[in-house]
Amino acid sequence: MKLYHAPKAVNPERTFHFLKAKGKLDAVEIVEISIMKQEHKTPEYRALSPFSQVPVLILDDGTKITESRAICTYFEDVFSEPNLMGRDGKEKALIEMWDRRIEFMLMLQFATWFRNAHEMMAPLEKPQSAEAAAKGERNAKAFAKRLDAHLAEHEWLAADRFSIADITLYLTCGFCGVMRWKPHREHEALGRWYDTVKAKFAAE
């Protein structure tokens, strides 16, 4: 298998850290792609990923899989332990519920803020919109408060254990630093949770 990866971009990092949590980084060939250099838009890369998405997983039989969560679903099947997506219907539903909440209510909102406000993104986001940036910032910060309230009563995001939802949130919190915003330093429970996940990955 071959995984095309863009370091520091949230969705590629999700598949990378998912593999790391599985202890299987050495089982997949990792090929790095630079989004800022627009290597994902070359004809050669588009032949692998028609929508220029990173990551893309190429299976040994030539099958191409894009969408980070779909790739993680494949990894969950072939590398079954440790389980990160739920062992039964209830766990799977709760984990996916929180993972999707992080994607849509935090990651996407922050990405809208970042893409429309940061000068680095001007070549990729034409035209940038101050109104869209302000709305994304407002929504992201409001959801961070709700996350803090949830984590004040729970050790992990979902199903009372570490899961892909925690990976998605951890990476999104790190991503927020590009706008000099660190939600895990503004909110106590979120900060406690973040430090726990950081220590977990450091030990692996």
Image (cartoon, rainbow, N blue to C red):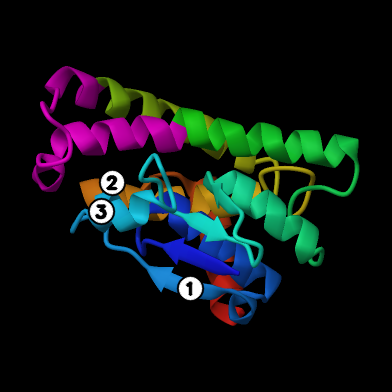
Q: Note whether residue 170 is visible.
A: yes
Q: Which residues are magenta?
A: 106-134
Tell me how far mark 2 sits from mark 1, CA to CA. Answer: 30 Å
Q: Is residue 6 above or below residue 203?
A: above
Q: Classify residue 6 by image quadrant.
A: bottom left
In the picture of the structure, the residue carrying the numbered disc 1 is 30
Q: Residues within 10 Å of mark 1 (few under 14, many from 20)?
A: some
Give the quarter of the figure containing the C terminus. bottom right
Which of these two is toward me, 137 or 25?
25
Residue under the image location 89 percent in, 36 percent down: 89
Give the quarter of the figure containing the N terminus. bottom right
Judged by its main secondary structure, the magenta piece is helix
Tell me how far mark 2 sits from mark 3, CA to CA. Answer: 32 Å
Residue type marked 3: Thr
In the picture of the structure, the residue carrying the numbered disc 3 is 42
Residue under the image location 79 percent in, 44 percent down: 159
Q: Note whether residue 163 is visible.
A: no
Which numbered disc covers residue 181?
2
Disc on the earlier residue, 1 or 3: 1
Query: Is 19 on the left-hand or right-hand side of 144?
Result: right
For marks 2 and 3, give the one nearer the viewer: 3
Label 1: element kind: strand
